[in-house]
Image (cartoon, rainbow, N blue to C red):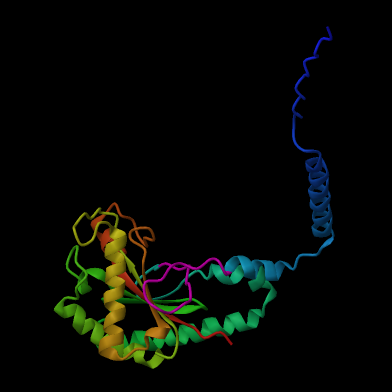
Amino acid sequence: MARRRQQKPESSQNGAPAWMNTYGDMVTLLLCFFVLLFSMSTIDIVKFQELISSFDNRIDLMPGGMAIEEGEMIVSGISQLDDLAFYTEQGRDGDEDSYEERLEESRETAEAIEELLEEHNISDNVEVNYTAQYIQLSLDGAFLFDSGLADLKNEGIELMEIVGDILRNYESQDIAVEGHTDNIPIESFRFPSNWYLSSARAITVADYLINNKGFNPETLFAVGYGEYRPVDTNSTAQGRARNRRVEIKIVNEVN
């Protein structure tokens, strides 16, 4: 009797399909090709810095557009702030004479504003500082607002009336309104943190300039920094009082 042979099942192929090896080789070759191209290319440092700086913009709470950085108050009256932004690689390659001219223009504008503040007897409540990039008016937060609130007091409204009239001379330029607080924590239903409070105060001042003094909202923006950009120590009452402020920056036009 013939025996029936039992067929053995075909063993399944182990591992990845053969085409995957070819595909992997192709991807590796493409990677080497692009790495070689990059290594042979020349990077324009100035354009690369411009690309990086284009991402260095904060989220603003009102329309406008420009991000404004360095600067802190030094003493009362007119002070020149450190203009660090100009001394970047791009700034050093630029026209240094142009920088000096802009700095001189800022100084003249700051002096003119200081004279107007003294005429209206409010120079004690407003500090004027400047860089080549902007002229800064720092308003006493305690004079504008009650503690923990973002509504202008009566004397704050009077101050804003005068400051607004002075700023009308520069309303064609971009204007930044920046709110600041001390480091004393605030926890309220309306303002969960100092960041909320400083932002609300900046918006209040900007809103007053728009609705009461006719400023263009497209050239004005407001932002809050909370307690994170102090100009004085927070360990004393006097220092904390200086840190509670609203800064208004008149941005110089770049030719």
Task: Decide if residue 158 is in sight here.
Answer: yes
Q: Is residue 134 magenta?
A: no
User: At x 76% / y 29%, what residue is drawn?
Assistant: 13
Closer to the camera in the image, 40 or 231? 40
Q: Is residue 55 magenta?
A: yes
Q: How far across and how far down the image is residue 156, in percent?
A: 20, 78
Tell which residue pokes out farthest to the front in this image.
Answer: 1
Q: Quadrant of residue 77?
A: bottom left
Q: Quadrant of residue 220?
A: bottom left
Q: Is residue 94 left or right of residue 194?
A: right
As drawn, 170 above or below 49: below
Q: Which residues are magenta?
A: 54-72
As drawn, 126 above or below 33: below
Where, quadrant-wise, is the N terminus in this rendering? top right
Task: Decide if residue 177 is in sight here.
Answer: no
Q: Is residue 28 left or right of residue 64?
A: right
**Principal secondary structure, stretch drawn in magenta:** loop
Where, quadrant-wise, is the C terminus in this rendering? bottom right
Q: Is residue 145 left or right of residue 166?
A: left
Q: How far across and how far down the image is residue 23, in percent?
A: 79, 46
